[in-house]
Image: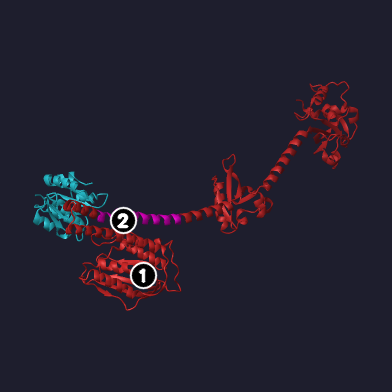
Amino acid sequence: MPPHMGRPGDPLSALDRVQKDPLGTSAPSRPATGVDPTLFRVLLDDATDPVFVLDADGVVLDANAAALEAAGTGRVAVVGAPFTALFSGADAALDRSWADAASGSCRVNDADGVRTWSFRFRGVEAAGRTYIVANGRDITARLAEEEERIRHGEDLMRIIKMLPDVIFICEKRADGKIYWTLNEGKLAEEFGLTTKEIEGKSLEELFPGGASEYIRTEFENAFKGIAKEFVNEMGGRYFKHFPQPITGDDGKVKYVVGFISEVTSLVEAEKKIQALNDELTDRLDEVAAANRDLEAFTYTVSHDLRSPLAALDSIAQVVNEADGPRLDEAGRKRIGRMRATIATMGRQIEDILRLSRAGRTPPEREETDLAPLAQDTFEMLKASRPERVVAFEVPESLPAYADPGQMRVVLDNLVGNAWKFTEGTEDARIELGVEETDEGPTYYVRDNGAGFDPAHADALFDPFTRLHEDSEFKGSGIGLATVRKIVARHGGKVWAEGAPGKGATIRWTLPRPDEADDGDPVTEDAA
Amino acid sequence: MKKILVADDNMDILESTAMLLELRDFAVVAVGDGTTILETVRKERPDAILQDIHMPGLDLEAHLRALRADPDVCETPVLLFTASANAPEEWLSHGADGFVRKPFDADRLKEVLDVAVRDGREGAKAGAMVA
């Protein structure tokens, strides 16, 4: 391209020619280049964007076809008119001098305000004169789009602000701290944590103290790309965060977006469910305990009662075979044995009933002396086996605040056990007494009999638990269970100490009147 | 007449079982004290032993071991009385040969004892657990 054509690719560098023939109507002079100036005219008129050529004061010297169309009028009206008169808004836009505008731009509307143009101005020096080329572009559609986008964004923001939850965007800045660029929603408003309010404040500044530690860890993880929901507590309320890392092209997390929901009612409901669950578990434990009793009962019925039944059966067979249809003295004796066996069953059933009664009957407490009750029990045992030599030591008086009838059952069982388990013990001895302890008066029955394995000390009080074979020591296995039930209903507790061959000591407490309550029938089985 | 040693600390069971066996032409040696069983076996040389599992003063495991260690009586079949629905099988490895569940049918018991007396310990094993 020849040097006087100006910089390559600049179509307006031929302005000097246009100036010589502003209307482009005269016959072209011999072209200095290989291109006829008329061609520029054609090119300009073909251009879809408007181009005006103004003088230094903004008066139109020339305009292409698109420019005429934009101005909405003919060439005659355009040429010689000030540029600002052609479009509305141009005045305001061009409030600066044309000299300044020569390197700027403005946005104007056409006369009826439908279309919007953006003009870029550019000063051009040619042949000692200053021209301004105004290069326009129709931006009506783009503006509409932009407007639409803005409106859309505003609508979205409005919606976000209406949300009961919080929508957030946060980023990690150069200082390594986390900042929020968006934090909106009713909750944010309520806590004074909207975008505007927290702008420029890091996580640590927003949540000072140890409370931030947990949140920070979670957000740090989110910035490592780990999306994990978490719940935090604030002023007795609970909030669930759903952070979502957004990665950039480099694969690094650019920011973390997400939302926060209040889950207080959920957490509270969960707590309630947990409480109900715990209660249910407790109830189940009670039911399980009841079931254990029942199972033990079934066991006893099927096992312990089987032996006397077997005996009955055998004797019945003997009566049948040996004595035949005729009953003599011996036959009557055998019938007597059967009756005795039936009586055994009866006693066992009686024991079971006593256990069940002990759990149901509230004690009628009064000042009671346990010493004579124990003495009575011992005398009855002695009368049943006069040949046995057992030393019995009991203080003159053992005052207690208890139901005398139920205490008789307790002592029958405890003294009865001591009597039973000292069978075969040399210098058998049974002692009763009371000691003052932190738990109040603690009574005891001590023997030097067979004893028991201390590992089973607790099981001893479970109904139907037998630590000794029936053949060693007769019993239904519910005596101590009955004792425990009665003592528990008195608000006291009972426990056993002993070792195999070293005797056993059963101790129990009975609260004094000021601390006595009705016991706790629900937890007594757990004692 | 074949001789059966019956041992049980429940006198009702002991005496009635003894009678039922006597009515079936067995000679019965009744033992109510578990600690004297072995001594009685050595003296009486019964053809079979029918004894309760649990007897006062009796360590059944030691008792069976002693019985099986004594060349004079080691081949005596031993049947254990049990009231339990489930026979405690471990006793078989300790030297017992079978179980008789209480309550029992006397005729059925006779059949089991007949086999035990005739065939010894193998016979007792065959008749284990009388219904």
Q: Chain of mark 1?
A: A
Seen as rendered, the residue at the extreme front is A326
Amino acid identity at mark 1: Met
Q: Is residue A74 left or right of residue A272?
A: right
How far across and down, in percent of the image, does residue B82 sit? 23, 52
Q: Chain of mark 2?
A: A
The circle on residue A407 is 1
Residue B69 against residue A95 in the figure, above or below: below
Give the tally of numbered discs: 2
Residue A22 against residue B43 in the figure, above or below: above
Label 1 vs 2, first from the N-terminus: 2
**Residue A527 in sight in this render:** no
Q: Is residue A420 left or right of residue A526?
A: left
Q: Which chain is cyan?
A: B
Most prominent secondary structure in the magenta stretch? Answer: helix
- For the residue pair A519 and A72, the one nearer the viewer reads as A519
**Residue found at x 40% / y 68%:** A492
- Distance between mark 1 and mark 2 Cα atoms: 25 Å
Amino acid identity at mark 2: Thr
Q: Which residue is mark 2?
A: A300
Q: Secondary structure at mark 2?
A: helix
- For the residue pair A225 and A324, the one nearer the viewer reads as A324
Numbered range of the magenta stretch: A281-309
How far across and down, in percent of the image, does residue B18 sit? 16, 54
